[in-house]
Amino acid sequence: MISKISDIDVAELRPMWRPRPSSAHKGTMGHALLVVGSRGMAGAAILSAEACLRSGLGKLTVLTPEENRQILQIAVPEAIITSQWPPQAFNAIGIGPGLGKDGDAVRKCLAIRDIPLVFDADAINVLAQEREWHGEIPPSTILTPHPLEAKRLTGSRDPEGVSAFAVRHRVFVVLKGHPTHVCTPEGEVLRLRVGNPGMATAGSGDVLTGIITGLLAQGYTPREASLLGVWLHGAAGDFSADEMGENCMLARDIIRHLPEAFGLLKNQKLRDKN
């Protein structure tokens, strides 16, 4: 059953937030895998990787074509870069930004049942083309389409129609936009009004994928990671607009303002953006 659309704000999200333990080390803060980038699309890999690490993640491996290795290693030296599917276990996997038409990588992720997944961008477009794969999407997977991608995947670009897809396949769908809607497997449609039109810029969605994947790897549930990720992304975008103006914002500005967003989430600022 699909419920009505409900607004959710930062006051409701704050109890979800968990401070880092004083005994934390990189091995206890999660290890994520990002399957990102293709020839000419190293930028998407860089943006999602840096955002993932900025979410508080302990370790990150980036799977990307060999021609992207050098630029990734220079741009994001904290990440492990590989062009071969790594054998180790991960706490979360994000796939899609800049991926291209790599159906094999999407199939590998669809076969995973014990690791939380995030599908974005080109991974969603592959799923939209291969409709017989929809029944193989693991329950509680997070999909993060913009309205056109949602139309291709679900047949609808409206929250109510997208929610029906989320319920049918037992997944979370983050319908990006202003506002953004998080559709849950239980039929909830949760609206977050944080963010601004300046975030309608290339790479903004790659940043969101990185943040959500990083939160999942740290042990947040798919529901928590979706809601916190959307809010942090939007709040950082609002701080970016305050500094740069909506016309001049770049996706990398959103990453740069994540510290202020985290501070606001932890109630370290007096001013709420929503």
Image (cartoon, rainbow, N blue to C red):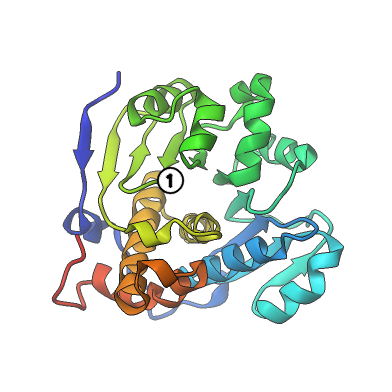
Q: Residue at x 80, y 53 (%)?
A: 85
Q: Name the residue beneath numbered marker 1.
A: 222
Residue 49 visible at all:
yes
In which quadrant is the C terminus drawn? bottom left
Callout 1, which amino acid?
Pro
Please identify the quarter of the rendering in which residue 13 is found.
bottom left
In the image, residue 163 lies at what x, y percent?
Answer: 38, 27
* Residue nearest the observer in this picture, 255 or 221: 255
Residue 29 visible at all:
no
In the image, residue 56 lies at what x, y percent?
Answer: 46, 71
Please identify the quarter of the rendering in which residue 261 is found.
bottom left
Q: Is residue 125 left or right of residue 188?
A: right
Whether 211 is drawn above or below 262: the answer is above
Indicate the secondary structure of the residue bearing disc 1.
Answer: helix
Please identify the quarter of the rendering in which residue 104 is found.
top right
In the image, residue 54 lies at what x, y percent?
Answer: 49, 72
